[in-house]
Amino acid sequence: MKRTFDHLMSSILYRIRKAILQRDMETFLLISAGAILGANLRYLIGGWAADQFGSSFPYGNLIINLSGSLILGFFMTLAVDRFLLDPRLRVLVAIGFLGSYTTFSSYTFESVSLIMNDQWLAGLFNLFGSAFMGGLAVVAGIILARAI
């Protein structure tokens, strides 16, 4: 079992190194710069929300998820439909910044995009399936961690 796990990890690391070397370094730096900003803003908003509203409910996450969804919908519409912004800006904002700020925004944007493109079943499956199966995955993670 350990040998299989070691082989799997070695294979994953090899693929990551290969992808980094084959990709444009500028793209990775743009993603990284955006991610630094998004992660720090997430941290600041989470702390602010806990100070303002208490920690009995995850208000910070709610604010982050809703604002991230709003920003992604707004930005991608401007970037693709209205102004055809430089793809590097899309990488910086949509993947880097919003990717670390919240993955919820990507999930909701992709689900709604499928629905708006008349792919109702796929959109609804992604929307509700991700939430339900994500909940099951959290429960499985808790059970596995408690078993150790």
Image: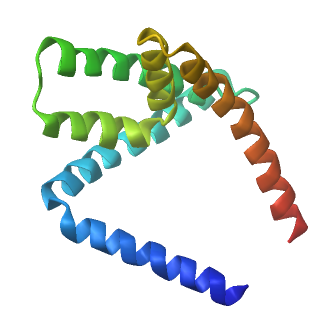
Q: Is residue 147 left or right of residue 22?
A: right
Q: Position of residue 117 (x, y in %)?
A: 41, 13
Judging depth in this view, the residue of 90 and 133 nearest the camera is: 133
Q: What is the residue that sits farthest to the right in this orientation?
A: 147
Count every numbered label the image shows and give the total. 0
Q: Identify the residue shown where x is 47% and y is 78%.
A: 11
Q: Position of residue 54 (x, y in %)?
A: 69, 27
Q: Is residue 86 left or right of residue 128?
A: left
Q: Identify the residue shown where x is 37% and y is 40%.
A: 38
Q: How is the image coloured?
A: rainbow
Q: Identify the residue shown where x is 50% and y is 30%.
A: 107
Q: Identify the residue shown where x is 64% and y is 83%.
A: 4
Judging depth in this view, the residue of 25 and 110 nearest the camera is: 110
Above or below, 8 relative to 49: below
> In what quadrant of the picture does the C terminus appear?
bottom right
Q: Position of residue 135 (x, y in %)?
A: 75, 37
Q: Quadrant of residue 8?
A: bottom right
> In what quadrant of the picture does the N terminus appear?
bottom right
Q: Position of residue 98 (x, y in %)?
A: 37, 35
Q: Is residue 30 left or right of residue 56?
A: left
Above or below, 29 relative to 111: below
Q: Is residue 6 left or right of residue 11?
A: right
Above or below, 9 relative to 85: below
